[in-house]
Image (cartoon, rainbow, N blue to C red):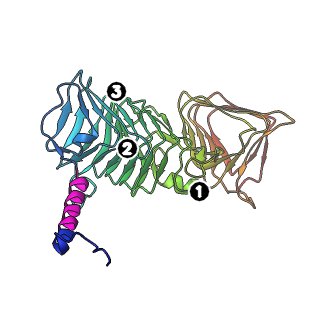
Amino acid sequence: MSKPLYNRVGGIHAKRLFCLSSVAIFVAFSSPAHATDVTSNITTNTTWDVAGSPYIVKTSIFVINGVTLTINPGVEVKFEGNYSLTTQPLGIINAQGAIGNEVKFTSNKAIPAKGDWLGLSLSNSSIIDHVIVEYAATAINIISVSPPIQNSLIHYNNKGLSFSYASNSMITGNTITDNLTGIYLEGSTFGYPNPTINNNSIYNNQNYNIYATNDITGAIKSTVNVQNNWWGTTDPYVIMNKIYDIVDSTNGPTVDFTPFLDGINGNSIGGQYVHGGITQNTIWNSNQGPYIAISNITVTNGATLTIDPGTEVKFDGNFSLTVNGTLNAVGTAANMIKFTSNKISPSPGDWNRLQLNTNGSVIQHAIIDLPQISGRLVKMEKSVFRNQKD
């Protein structure tokens, strides 16, 4: 006689009880950890760990001076409403996650959207590394301080990173995408932000990938180092059209985005493209050329552009090289400097002019294929003008 499939004493009822017990055990082990409400400022050194996660922020929170808030890998911080997490000048947020175990700052809404909460405001000593920040008005707000932001995902915010006044943050290894504006920089009489933004992926932000402006008319021109990033494309015009800077407003800085990467963590290309303002002493040499102007170029007051023998400068449209500082373009008889069109079949009038607005520039041993040269006193010797527009 064969044995029954389950115990004779309990019969089918024992089998049902076993199944229900299994369900109960599964539910017990799969239920989420108890959330921790955050309702007051951080006034003593505090660690948020996975056991207390998620942390539900129910009011705007300050990390007060002299206090460190440490947020461990894997912790989620959810904001119940229009609240922020802010450090006082000597407070610290130390949020260091890991690959696959990031710290996450997000909305607590069932259906989250950009602008659900205010964002993070950081002090100089704060650290953001392997962090996700999403659905904020401004994901990370940096005012006159320079904390590093690295290896993090900043997405689905109104603004990704916002820099105001003087700041020299290092921004590296991040993905900044699907925000309204990726990175926002604004200067004033208190200074201009000058972060170094290298080796990131900055693309697919709705309005601008970078918006750089200045609220001072006639402000001293500066250059922001935004080199070697991936922009979702290798077309320099597409990249430039998603950057708001001196090309769009004379009060803005130059956002120097060349060279750029040819993919995520890709190779550096495009170093020959030049645009906007030259705000510091700069040398163009033949080994790096030809230099291709993709907008008007302005050598600002106090800056010198030196162009070495044998260098070619090509203009990709109706653009000018305007000199408000100094131009030293000194070639040799064997290695002449050349200013010309970038068109495959060039013709007179392809580009605009050399405009020299200050005394003291020098052009020697140069070939100038252009419509006109104009401006102030310049030392010009042993040069060739050709293909000029009538």
Give the image quarter of residue 359.
top right
Marking on residue 95: none
Asked if residue 21 lies left or right of residue 200, the reply is left
Q: Which residue is mark 2?
A: 102
What amino acid is at disc 1?
Asp
381 and 248: which is toward the camera: 248
Of pointers 2 and 1, the one earlier in the residue sequence = 2
Between the C-alphas of marks 1 and 3, the distance is 36 Å
Residue 178 position within the rendered picture, expressed as x and y whole percent measured from the top left: 39, 56
Of pointers 1 and 3, the one earlier in the residue sequence = 3
Q: Looking at this view, name the residue that lies furthest to the right.
A: 334
Region of the chain picked out in magenta, as a range: 17-32
Question: Residue placed at 24% from the left, 41% from the top?
Answer: 51
Which is closer to the viewer, label 1 or label 3? Answer: 3
Asked if residue 368 lies left or right of residue 158, the reply is right
Residue 325 position within the rendered picture, expressed as x and y whole percent measured from the top left: 57, 31
Which is closer to the viewer, label 2 or label 1? Answer: 2
Which is closer to the viewer, label 3 or label 2? Answer: 2
161 falls in the magenta region: no
What amino acid is at disc 3?
Asn
Give the image quarter of residue 47.
top left
Q: Which residue is mark 3?
A: 124
Residue 308 position within the rendered picture, expressed as x and y whole percent measured from the top left: 74, 33
Where 277 sits versus 107, above or below?
Answer: above
